Structure formats: structure tokens, C-alpha cells
Image: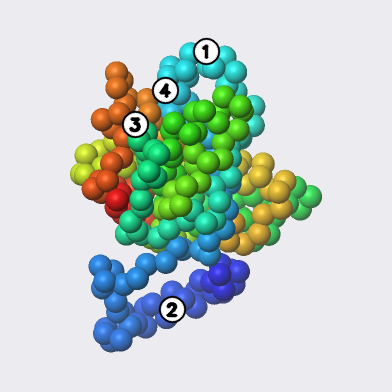
Amino acid sequence: MALIEGGAAAINATRELLRWAADRQDPLWMDDPNTVEWLTPVPEKSIFCAGRNFGRHKLESMKGNVDNASKLHSDFPTGFIKLGRTLVPHKSQVKRPDDVLDFDYEVEIALVIGKAIDARRDIDPASAIFGYTIFNDLSAREWQLREMQNGMIMLGKNFPGFGPIGPYILTADEVPDPKALVLWLKVNGELRQHSDCRDLIFGFAEMVAFWSRFGLVPGDLISTGTPEGVALHHKPDPREWYLKPGDRVEAGVDGIGVLETFIV
């Protein structure tokens, strides 16, 4: 958090330290990423998660529920809260709940807030973004769909371990065009999702501006929503696409890395 809250000066000092360590090639400064204990890139805290925010995913959702399609709108960002206790780091094992069979994946980009912003402050929303990381919004569809009949979502998104996040944060100054970010997801090596952020209905700055009404602070997280390709909307039978114990899930964003999760 000190790096995030320290702004440009902290980032520049950290980059200088990394250059110094790279020049020395001292093994005391180097760790094998396959053997380190990974942590979440920010302390565990709740995430503002956008829903149906990729155009093609919204269309597949409408086709999957024709009766509800006329009620969907894009007047402003909508979504739900993912509890901080669900967040787990890179290479975590996530247990499929005993009463869940319709266990779905959703690759997303989570933006990390770097400065305080609320609806009353005259701040460029884009300038409040510290960087971007990878998020997999794991979902228990049988619970989620029943909850949505009452117009709510909670349990279906918030079982333990349902928020893999990481492994790295790509700072905003290294992303000249966030819309060009490409995200994808594979299950056991099979490509399931692939899109760039040009398909977003509400872009990164728009989501920050809208949800600044909550009063955002450094370290807060906002997730984009997911592109098309989730198991739920595979026809005719999505059951073969849902996650099962033994599956290996890779959620990737080009330029950031790959977030790996093991289903048990």
C-alpha cells in the first residue's frame, strides 16, 4: 500500500531499485516465481464489480434469458460487491462448494485506485487509477440465478476463494490505451474467453467516475465485468463447460501476466 499511496515518487524510486538489483544479479534479491508464496496484490478488501459491461457478453446474456432481456439497460454502470474475504492469490487452490455444480469462470481486469476521489472532488477519474491487475470472478450459477430472481446477488459470488486476483499490477503509466488491453481465459489449456477492452460498454474512467459516489480511496478495486464465453451461455448443455475438481484455470491479460487457479 505504501507504493500505491506514495504516487509517482514511490514508483520512480522502486524502478530505480529494480534496475540496481538487475545490474547486481545478487541471488538474495531474486526469487523463483514458481517457488515463492504469492500474496494478493493489494490487501483483501471488497471489490466493486461491474455486471454485463462487455457488449458481446451482454448480448449472450440476453439470448440466454429472453424473458429478462427487455429489462436490461446500459443507462449507467450496475454491478455487485465481491467481499474481500473471497480474494485469493495466484496459484491458489479453490474448493468447489459441496452444493455447487454450476461453477463458472469470468476473466476480468481489476483497476486499482491510487488516490482518493469522490463525486464532489474535481479530479480527472483516469488520474485516480494506479494500475491494472487480473481478476477471476468465480460464480456459483445455480445460487446466482435464484438470487437474481429477487433482483439481488450475494452468495452466488461470495463463497470462500471465489476471487482469485493477481499476480501483478501493471501501473497506469505503462498503459497508454487501456481499451487495447486483451484479456483471455483457458481451462486445462482450452481457450474459453478472449476479447479486448474496446468491447466495454463503460470504460475504466467512466466506472471510476460513477462509483466515486461511494468515496474511493487508495487500494480500492473496480472490476470491468467479463467478456463473452462464460460456461453458463454454452449451448445446448453448459454442464460440460462448468469447472470441476482437477481443473486448471489460467486467466490472462496481455502485458500483465497469467493468474493461475486450481479447482479442488
Asked if 36 appears above or below 236 in the picture, the reply is below
Instruction: Find the residue positioned furthest to the right.
Output: 120
User: Can residue 132 be spotted in the picture?
Assistant: no
User: Which residue, given by chain and number where applicable, does mark 4 sit on?
Assistant: 60
Mark positioned earlier in the residue sequence (2 or 4):
2
Task: Determine whether label 2 and label 4 are within 8 Å by CB.
Answer: no
Mark nearer the N terminus (3 vs 2): 2
Q: Tell me the kind of residue under disc 2.
A: Glu
Residue 228 x %, y %: 38, 30
- Mark before the other along the chain sequence, 1 or 3: 1
User: Which residue position is annotated with label 3?
Assistant: 231
* Mark 3 and mark 4: Cα distance apart in space: 11 Å
Q: Which residue is mark 1?
A: 67
Mark 3 vs mark 4: which is more N-terminal? 4
- Which of marks 1 and 4 precedes in the sequence? 4
On the picture, is 108 further left or further right than 51?
A: left
Crowd rating for badge 2 (residues with CA inside 10 Å; few <14, some 14–19, many 20+):
few
- Which of pointers 1 and 2 lies earlier in the amino acid sequence? 2
Residue 60 in view: yes
Mark closer to the observer (1, 2): 1
Return the x and y of residue 6 as percentages of the image width and height.
59, 72
Q: Which residue is mark 2?
A: 16
Report, in whole angstroms, how far the alpha carbon at label 3 lies from the one at label 2. Answer: 44 Å
**Front tag of 2 and 4:** 4
